[in-house]
Image (cartoon, rainbow, N blue to C red):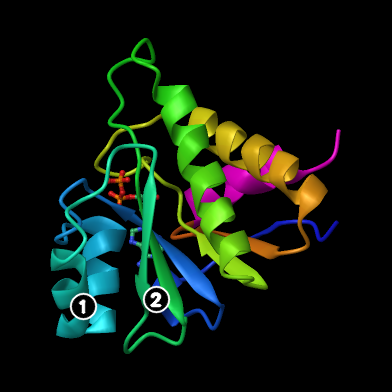
Amino acid sequence: MVNPEAITANIVSLNVDAIVNAANSSLLGGGGVDGAIHRAAGPELLSECRQLNGCSTGQAKVTLGYRLPARYIIHTVGPVWHGGDLGEDRLLASCYRTCMAEAASLALKSIAFPAISTGVYGYPLALATRIAVDTIMNQLEHTKIQVMFVCFDDEVRAVYEEVLSPG
Ligand code: ADP
């Protein structure tokens, strides 16, 4: 198993097979990491997204990366945090699992995830990080893909390092 790693970076700069976008269900762009990805990928991305008819929470759809170094973008829609009783944990885990399934079906060797749902969608960072790491660890038992958790700032990085550290 290749262990996942946490890095501090702007996800749009990464030279990986696919980056994951924390999109909204319209797939037509938004703020945060979604806005950054659309700006960096260029207008062709929005044209392709318009053909996709949106995406349900917990699911994912794939586009090309256009002007990004990454070949593909896997757009997934994380849950909005409503306090934790509306299946947010199950939906967030589904995002990570579905993206990994798409990556496997494309035979990708590397994938970079942002901290899905932890920005505007309000998912508590420590809870979301635990789900991200546990779900990916389970997936890595049956695939060799290299996984990066992309942290936009040191606060996010510290939480990922804590959850990833053994013991
Ligand atoms: P959501 O709507 O799913 O909460 P956001 O984009 O608001 O998504 O935030 C998700 C996470 O992505 C946050 O931790 C935010 O700091 C981070 N983020 C924002 N821009 C970038 C970027 N360019 N690269 C990597 N992470 C980013």
At label 2, counting other C-alpha atoms closer than 10 Å, the crowd grade (few under 14, some 14-19, many 20 or more) is many
Q: Residue at x 14, y 60 (%)?
A: 28
Q: Of the residues shown, which amino acid type is indicated by label 2? A: Val
For badge 1, the amino acid type reads: Arg
Residue pictured at 23% horizontal, 73% vertical: 38
Q: Position of residue 36 (x, y in %)?
A: 26, 70
Please provide percent x and percent y for residue 47.
14, 76
Per the picture, the main secondary structure of the magenta-coloured stretch is helix
Tell me the magenta residue range: 154-167
Residue 159 versus residue 122: which sits nearer the camera? 122
Residue that appears at 27% across and 37% down: 121
Circle 2 — which element? Answer: helix
Residue nearer the viewer, 159 or 112: 112
Indicate the quadrant containing the N terminus: top left, top right, bottom left or bottom right.
bottom right
Whether residue 71 can be seen here:
yes
Above or below, 63 against 140 in this view is below
Residue 67 lies left or right of residue 142; in this view the side is left
The image quadrant where one finds the C terminus is: top right
Disc 2 to disc 1, C-alpha distance: 9 Å
Mark 1 element type:
helix
Magenta includes 114? no
Q: Nearer the viewer, residue 13 or 157?
A: 13
Instruction: Tell me if 37 is positioned left or right of 153 in this view.
Output: left
- Look at the numbered disc 2 and say if its residue's Cβ is closer than 8 Å to ligand 1: yes
| Residue 92 horizontal/vertical position (percent) | 45, 34
Tell me, for residue 12, which label it has, or none. 2
> In which of the image's four quarters is ligand 1 placed?
bottom left
**Residue under pointer 1:** 39
Above-or-below relation of 134 to 45:
above
Query: Is disc 2 in contact with disc 1, using a CB cutoff of under 8 Å?
Result: yes
